[in-house]
Amino acid sequence: MFAAVSLILSALSASTLVLAAPRPISQPALEKKSALPTHWYHKRDHPVHELFRRGPGDDPLPAVGSPEWAANFAGVGQTPENNIPQKWLDALAAAEHAGLIPNFAPALTTDGGLTTSSYPPGTNAGQEPICSSMYQCRHKDDVWDAPANMIGLSVDDGPVSYPTASPRLYDFLKANNQKVTHFMIGANILGNPQMFLRAYEELEDDIAVHTWTHRHMSTLTNRQLVADLGWTLQIIHDSTGGRVPQYWRPPFGDADNRVRAVAMHVFGMTTVIWNQDSQDWTMAAPGGTTLPAIQAAFTRWLNGPRNPGLIVLQHEITADDVTAFINMYPLIAAASEAGRAQGLEPWRVVSVSQLFDGSADGTQGSSEHEGWYQNSWNNTAPVDDVDIIDGGYAASISDASLTASATPTSRAANGTVPGGPTGTTIPTQSVSINSATVGKKGVWATVGLGLAGVFTLVL
C-alpha cells in the first residue's frame, strides 16, 4: 500500500528535475473553438477567480512546463499547508466567521491521512452532523448519480507519463472522440505538464480537482484543506489561461460536512463521488480484483437498471487501469443494443460535467449549471475579468434525502500509485457540530472583510 505514497512523493521531490527537461508549451490559443457541442462551464463572473489571479487579467501566464511556471509552485512540496496565500486564509476566516464551516475536529489518523482515517469512538459518521461519504451518507449537494440512461465517464489521479497509462488512455479517447472528466492531482500536474496539456488542449477534456497530496481530507485541519485544494486549483488556473474548476472528487471518497463546506464556501466547489466502484485500484494488491472481474461488473451494471445512470470510479495511473477502461468501452454499445430489443433507450455516454450542462444532446441545459469552469464560457474562450458578482450556483444533482450507513465502505487509495492500499477501515462513530447549515442551494454573494472572492450563500 505504500507504493501509492511513494509515487506522489517521488513526483514532488523530483519535480524540478522533471520540469527542467520538457520543452515549455505555450498556453492554448484562446481563439480555438471547443470541440464540444455547447459550453460546459459555470458562470464566468464567479468571485472565486479573485483568489487565484496572478495579475491584471492573468495575461500573460507563464508557458506550461516552463521554469517560470514551475517556480510558482516551488514552495508547495509535500506539505502545501506550509505556504498558504493570505487571501485564501482570509476567505477561510470569513466563511468560519459566517458560521458556514461546521465546528468539529478532523478525523483521526495514524499516518498523516495517507491511508487511514477514523472518528472518535461511539458515534455514527454515516449520519448528520458528520455525514461522511465514506459511510455512504449522501449529502444533497454532492454528485453521486447520473441521470437515467446516461453514463458520466471520469478518471482519477492523472496525469502520469508512463506510456501504458495516461498516454495510452488519451490515444484511445482521441481515437473514439470520447470526452471524460479528469480528476487530477496537483503534484502530478506539476510533474507531468505535457500530459496535462494533452488532456486539456489536445483532447479538450474537462479538468477537475483531486487535491495536491491525495490524503484523507477528513483528517486535515481547515487550513490544510484550504492549502491542498487551493494549490491544485491554482496550478489548474495557471495552466488553462486562468480557468477555475468548479468540481472536485475527494481521495478515497472521503468528505464529511466540514470538508465539503470548506470546498464549497471557500472555493465554490461541489463534491463529486460515484455510484459504482470498478475496484481497478486493487488490481496491483494481493487478493485484488482482476480484469475479467471488472468486465463482468460492468456487464452487470450496463445491463441492469438504467435509473439512476452510472458514474463509475476509474483511474488512469497504471496499464491495468487503462486496459480496464478500454475493455469496458465496447460493452456500452453491446448493452445498448441488447436494451433496444427490450424497448430501452441506448446509453448516452459523456463526461461527468456533460451530464448536467445540456451538451450531451447538443442543446443548452436548463439547470443553473452552465459549465465546468466558473469564469469562462468554454475551455478555450477568454477568461472573464469581472471581479465580483452574482454568479450562479451549480444545481444540486441529487435531491434525494440523506442516506447513511453505520459502517464505512472500504475505500481505495484512488491515489497516485499502482494499486494503492487494499482499503480503509473506519470505526463507527460521530462527533458534535456547532454549525449546521452548509451546502444549501442559493445565490452567491460576497461577505465580510471587503475581500472579493469571499462568499456565502443567500438561501
Image (tube, grey):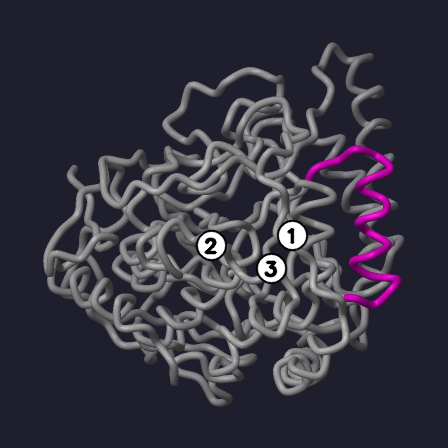
Q: Which residues are magenta?
A: 161-179
Crowding near pointer 2: few (<14 within 10 Å), some, many (20+)?
many
Q: Residue at x 71, y 15 (%)?
A: 344
Q: How far across and how far down the image is residue 150, in percent?
A: 63, 28
| Residue assigned mark 1 | 313
Q: Is residue 375 above or below residue 117?
A: above
Amino acid at the residue labelled 1:
Leu
Q: Quadrant of the C terminus?
A: top left
Residue 220's place in the image compared with 385, above or below, is below
Q: Mark 2 or mark 1: which is in front? A: 1
Q: Residues within 10 Å of mark 1 (few under 14, many from 20)?
A: many
Describe residue 80's horizontal placement relative to residue 27 as left or right.
left
- Which numbered disc flags the more N-terminal residue, 3 or 2? 2
**2 and 1 marks in contact (CB < 8 Å):** no
* Residue behind mark 3: 184
- Residue 13 in percent (x, y) is at 63, 87
Kind of residue sitting beneath label 3: Met
Lower sequence index among marks 3 and 1: 3
Callout 2 amino acid: Gln
Q: Secondary structure at mark 1?
A: strand
Q: Residue at x 82, y 61 (%)?
A: 165
Q: Name the residue beneath numbered marker 2.
A: 136
Residue 202's image quarter? Answer: top right
Total numbered badges shown on the rendered structure: 3
In this orientation, which residue lies closer to the viewer: 388 or 320?
A: 388
Residue found at x 77% / y 39%: 300
Image: 97 above or below 31: below
